[in-house]
Image (cartoon, rainbow, N blue to C red):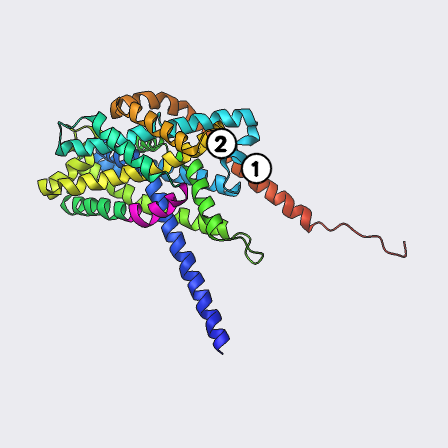
Amino acid sequence: MKLLEMNRMSDFNLTFKTTLSVVTGGFALFAMFFGAGNLVFPLLAGKSATSAFLPSFIGLCLTGIFVPFLGLLGILLYEGSYQDFFEKYGKKAAFILIFLMLLLLGPFGVLPRCITVAYGSFSVLDPSFPLSGFSLIMSGVVFLLCINQNQVVPLLGTILAPAKILSVGFILLFGLLFAKAPSQGFMAPFDAFQDGALKGYQMMDLIAGFFFATVIARHFKNKFRISENNPNASFNLTLYAILVGSSLLLVVYLALVYLGATFSEALSQKAPEQFLSAIAYLTLGSSAGRIVTVAIILSCLTTIVALTTVFTDFLYEQLFKKRLKRLHCLAITTLTTYLISNIGFSGIMTFLDPILFYLYPLLILLTVINIAIWFWRKNQITVSETVQVPVPSSDQ
């Protein structure tokens, strides 16, 4: 009887442990994705669409949630290895494509963009503080947080992500409470859908998903060893975490698009990186300044930490083949990010937009093809296993 009770308690502890890990992993994934672009572009989509915000939201979800989900799933099907995912097209082509994507996600794109959005919020409090000084401080903090790579996911999932969700959720809640119905706009529903889809492109989450999936999959593989009874344990847990993170993004994007539509007139005189701060000041007053600044800096910091880890690991493992110390690779990443961030948000987007226009459709096509190939091969293996080869009888 005692043995039965101990077994039940053990099963309960395992279930609680796995559930907590899935929630933590989902929070970490949300924290990785929800950075600079995710704060700015949903608000931009709502601001442009006004009364047609629902079609805009659907377009944004298509390219900003569903397409990145395909990327996450694709890498997961290939055992969490983005190298295996892209090497179907040749090792050299895969290396060039991966390096290009990581440069855009890393120090030549998303990383400095995150810093400029964080600065946009901070500058509302202190306009005289220079971008270069703010970027230097942020880069130094990121360097310190990324030194121990094994602590990145726990740090994101247990500390930074919950703090981000609470602070951003606080702003969104009060924004929605004070929001009024969006004014009647002139954008047709299909045009709003297209605009929202374009804003989803600009968030670059498909590219990020290829590499975030590797981080999350590695975390669950290390935490839960594969057993004979459940060989797909880490796959299933990673997939559940992805669903948790995607659900959080869906709710937050809807709130942001609606707020952009509601406060479209008030935002017309503001820079995009200052939109959320402006909404918070309109709804909460000047006393909300510190809360807003903390929320947006946390939102950007979590994405910066995740992407800095991914890019540093690529430099260390793939480019320099561990001949250069990981600490030095981390220093190269943060220093380059600091330098590029000084051209500002608009300058970075001017550089990124034409590249994304051609690169993103190609990546979507490759993702769909690779997923289809995986399922086709899986089906072929299943069919071959079910076909029984007739064994000649002894009479023959």
- Of labels 2 and 1, earlier in sequence is 2
Percent across and percent down for residue 326 are 43, 33
At x 41%, y 39%, the residue is 212
Name the residue nearer the viewer: 198 or 22: 22
At x 81%, y 52%, the residue is 391
Percent across and percent down for residue 66 are 40, 40
- Residue at disc 1, secondary structure: helix
Percent across and percent down for residue 77 are 52, 42
Disc number placed over residue 186 in the picture, else none: none
Disc number placed over residue 373 in the picture, else none: 1
Viewer-side label of 2, 1: 2
Specify the quadrant of the image occupied by residue 250.
top left
- Residue at disc 2, secondary structure: loop
At x 49%, y 39%, the residue is 75
Q: Three-letter amino acid code at disc 2?
A: Lys
Q: Is 311 positioned to the left or the right of 166 in the image?
A: right
Specify the quadrant of the image occupied by residue 350.
top left
Q: Is residue 364 visible?
A: no
Dot 2: within a 10 Å radius of its alpha carbon, few (fewer than 14), some, or many (20 or more) residues? some
Percent across and percent down for residue 224 are 48, 53
Q: Which residues are magenta?
A: 149-162
> Magenta-highlighted stretch: main secondary structure?
helix
